[in-house]
Image: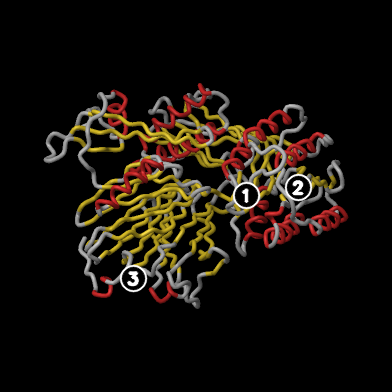
Amino acid sequence: MQTTLSNQEVEQKWPVITLYHIKSDIRFRYAVTVMLTELVNNGSLAKELTFMLRLPKKALISNFTLESNGKVVQGVVKTLALGEEDYSRVQRTASLGAYISAKPRNTHEFVVSVNVPARSSIACRLQYEELLERRLGTYHHVLDMKPGQIAPDYRVDVYIEESQPVVLLEMPKLRTRNAILKLANDTDNGKVNVYRYPTTDSGYGIHLSYYPSPRQQAQQTNEGIDAQLVIKYDVERRQDAGELQVFNGHFVHYFAPSGFEPINKHVVFILDVSGSMRGDRIKQLQEAMYGILQQLQRGDFLNIIAFNTLVQHWQGHTPKPYSPQTLISATEFISNMTSRSSTNINAALLDGVTLFNEFENLDVSQGLVFFLTDGDPTAGEKNATTILNNINVRKQGLRREFSIFSLGFGDSLDFSFLEKLSQENNGRARKIYTGEDAVSQLTGFYSEISKPVLSKVKVVYLDDRGEELDANLTQSHFFSFFNGSEIVVSGKLRDRETNSVQAVVTGDAKGRTIDYRVGALVTKDALMSSRLLERIWAYMTVKKLSIEALRATDLVQLDRIKDAGIKLSLQYNLVTPFTSIVVSEPEVSISMDRSDRYAKEAYRTRHKTDKDAPASINYLRIETRVVYRFAYTTVIAHVATPNAPGRNTAEILL
């Protein structure tokens, strides 16, 4: 890679970004995104450039490489401490290298540090993968754009190919940290072009392109674009058991029915009004709650708890039915909330879940907790594990099941605690970012869960004889299904030759039960060549294992989960934001241990070969970082390379 360096660049204090490209390929709602950045350093000393990279919450990094002067160096996944140590060596030797680590408390934000040697250019290539989530009737694909400089060559390309026709494509928006800016012909931010192109199966794909000029980039900030490109779309679907694709021993099943009447629900709002919520946060919470209360409907019941050091109930412990008078009273309570004192999360949650025992209305089949906090517990019980145990004990005496949906407001809290709280209680957690759009974030999240239409959903898969298939499934039982969302199940068949698969979906709707069935569709040639279904299964299984680890109750169970996680990470090279990735030119290293059969087996599995590794494995290092009892493990091997001049061993990630 040759780049001409100008005299002006000699005076730069940091490397100059000359190229910034993002390309996303979306097929079957599975997005593979590649970010390519080219940096130039024309100085006489090595220079470092550090910038922030935000990946989608559910994305997994699958590749990271550096290229300089024709040399390509592959990334190695390591724990944070070892990664920092190796990158320090890169800086000391002024060699080619980079380091990625998760920003504290934000598991999907990364600090990228790239060391560029003197008088050279370097290209950084980062690849990540994610299964797109359907919310409020559309799939959301969000691309973070924050190069930190104005790039002369700036390109964003998104390609969408689906098995069903795309029936809805919203005009993309450029979302800044605090606002939404629509991209239109008459703006200075540039224009997103949308094209349709034919595909091999007589269908069509969609290509979206965004190429802002340097002038257009400078219109936003002096450091260029700092925003997200938000793409929303949906596909045609039928009122049956959904879409089922099978190929080469793997299948993926998408289920997103429509037309159901919402189930009546009992909602308990548990709202943090401690001192840290003062100012804009309490005002934004109040404004959001005004809008959320308007989304309640006839047949719903509600309670409201405001908590700081003490716990305050709106109108006592008895759930109140929806009515205009109820909304007026609830709105008045919200308006009078003030922020002060400490944060007693334990007392608030225990009081809140106990409210589901206050009455038993047969017409209400869904219990929802809407829990918001902006900090860690500072009053009452402060230990997160003890709080979770207390809730589990309290649940045992309740007559009604429920879900806890948690919102973390800002950065000053342990979001992992909220994730575990929700995962153990049939819900999910969402981070709310401070800014002008915090109100829309809060109301938007509630809108996603405001209309449960199915409960106790179960999916089973049958062969052509009507017998249940022997398969390694991702999650196949669901407490609730919300209008506008989607259930996705993936499986690995024990018999890879099986092509006849039938999905059977059962569950409870309002006033009736459902029993839907659908057979497998013919898979496209493009999917066959890419092993896409297998990739989706691996991705979803990793996500399933992380949830199981959060809920593990003993070491035997945790060891089983860890072993499965190690095997998948070796075979599919999917890494986690809780680890770091180091890219550095390999050094001569000393063999430290005996050959290991497991490492050789992993090499054969990952590279789809019956042959041993091309070099003997002398040393195996397993590096583990434990986060909330889940072990994120990397296996790195030192291999003997006798034919390589000047080197005894090299380090590889299997």
* The image quarter in which residue 382 lies: top right
Relative placement, left or right, of 8 versus 536 is left
Return the x and y of residue 307 as percentages of the image width and height. 75, 47
Q: Amino acid at mark 2?
A: Phe
**On residue 14, which mark appears?**
none
Residue 353 location, x and y as percent? 75, 37
Badge 3 vs badge 1, beta-carbon distance below 8 Å: no
Up/down of 94 relative to 605, above or below: below
Mark 3 → mark 1, Cα distance in angstroms: 38 Å
The N terminus sits in image quarter: bottom left
Q: What amino acid type should be assigned to the residue bearing mark 3?
A: Pro
Nearest the viewer among 485 and 11 is: 11
Above or below 593: residue 360: below
Residue 549 position, x and y percent, is: 53, 32
Count of labels shown?
3
Q: Amino acid at mark 1?
A: Gly
| Residue identifier under label 2 | 307
- Residue 173 place in picture, x, y as percent: 52, 65
- Mark 3 secondary-structure assignment: loop
In the visual, does 64 lie left or right of 299?
left
| Residue under numbered circle 3 | 152
The residue located at (48%, 46%) in the rendering is: 131
Front-most of 63 and 167?
Answer: 63
Number of residues whose C-alpha sits closer than 10 Å to that of mark 2, classed few (under 14), some (14–19) or many (20 or more): many
Mark with earlier residue (3, 2) = 3
Circle 3 or circle 1, nearest the eye: 1
In this rendering, the label closer to the viewer, 1 or 2: 2
| Residue 425 visible in the shown view | yes
Residue that mark 1 sits on: 408
Disc with the residue nearer the chain's start (1 vs 2): 2
**Can you say which quadrant of the picture contains the C terminus?**
top left
Mark 2: which secondary structure?
strand
